[in-house]
Amino acid sequence: MIELLDSHAHVDGPEFDADRDQVLARARAAGVRRIVVIGAVGDPSSAERAVALAERDPDVFATVATHPHDVEKMTDAWWATHERLAVHPRVVAIGETGLDYYYDHSPRQAQQAAFRRFVELARRVGKPVVCHIRSQKEDATRVPGDSDAHEDARAILRETGALDLGVVIHCFTGSPADAEAYAAMGCYVSFSGIVTYKTAGALREAVTRVPRERLMIETDCPYLAPIPKRGKRNEPAFVVHTAEVVAAAAGLAFEELAQITTANAARVYRLP
Ligand SMILES: [Zn+2]
Ligand SMILES: [Zn+2]
């Protein structure tokens, strides 16, 4: 039996309130047995909801943090919630945290400070870090000197000792050279539905630069549904389509890609 794993899903969100149980059942029916729910959107009620989901379903695991978009709003109470939940046995990682220089919803300095503090929390509880990294420009038009979230992120990951904990670069959208640089540092590189889009040739090239023991896949649902579901609400069952494209790009059989990416996610998140 082929088993896939959605390594990054926001099924705690309101988009799934009406049919969450059916969404999880459809995932299982599609061979997506385990799901990592990222409790990091908006205020820490997302983290609380992710942990609650993980408590009631043995195949669901949670992460906790505040997304780089929202770190400017963080209060002491938000940090206290994350510190309390970080030690929870169903919490398998700290994240998503990182740098988003594309939207700049929070000032870059605030993003960098929160990123460092979340890595510190991860070190304290001995859990891996899930990173959201997006540069102002992600494509070949980027030139040296452009503010580069990936370069800043790699410096922070090195300086903070995050690499010893296990690092996932989620929804990777950087250049093939970025993918290679992350993998060389020992980071896992996770591809979302974006890799299926017609214009994403550079991302499919990036897949070839990641050694198979560092490859991961995810939905990042409800966003970024892969082709042929593009434009619809995304859900964990759809990771099958991303797996097909990543397998083709990597030159692997679908079964092999499924086995490898599931094992990689289970290893970095230390799933039972
Ligand atoms: Zn993200
Ligand atoms: Zn996400």
Image: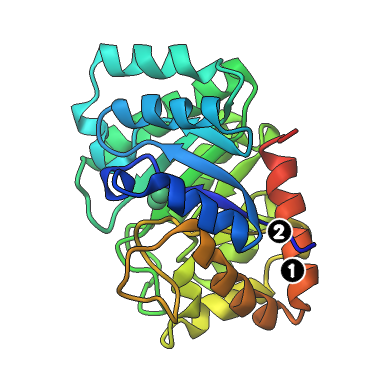
Q: Is residue 21 above or below residue 218?
A: above
Q: Is residue 135 above or below residue 82?
A: below
Indicate which disc residue 119 carries.
none
Q: CA distance from mark 1 to mark 2?
A: 6 Å
Q: Nearer the viewer, residue 88 or 170?
A: 88
Task: Report whether residue 132 is seen.
Answer: no
Tag 1 near tag 2, CB within 8 Å: yes
Q: Nearer the viewer, residue 259 or 166?
A: 259
Q: Position of residue 192 (x, y in %)?
A: 49, 64
Q: Residues within 10 Å of mark 2 (few under 14, many from 20)?
A: many
Q: Say left or right for 268 vs 159.
A: right
| Residue type, label 1 | Leu
Q: Position of residue 78 (x, y in %)?
A: 29, 18
Residue to which mark 2 is pinned: 261
The residue depicted at 50 percent of the width and 49 percent of the height is 24
Residue to which mark 1 is pinned: 257
The quarter of the picture where residue 38 lies is top left
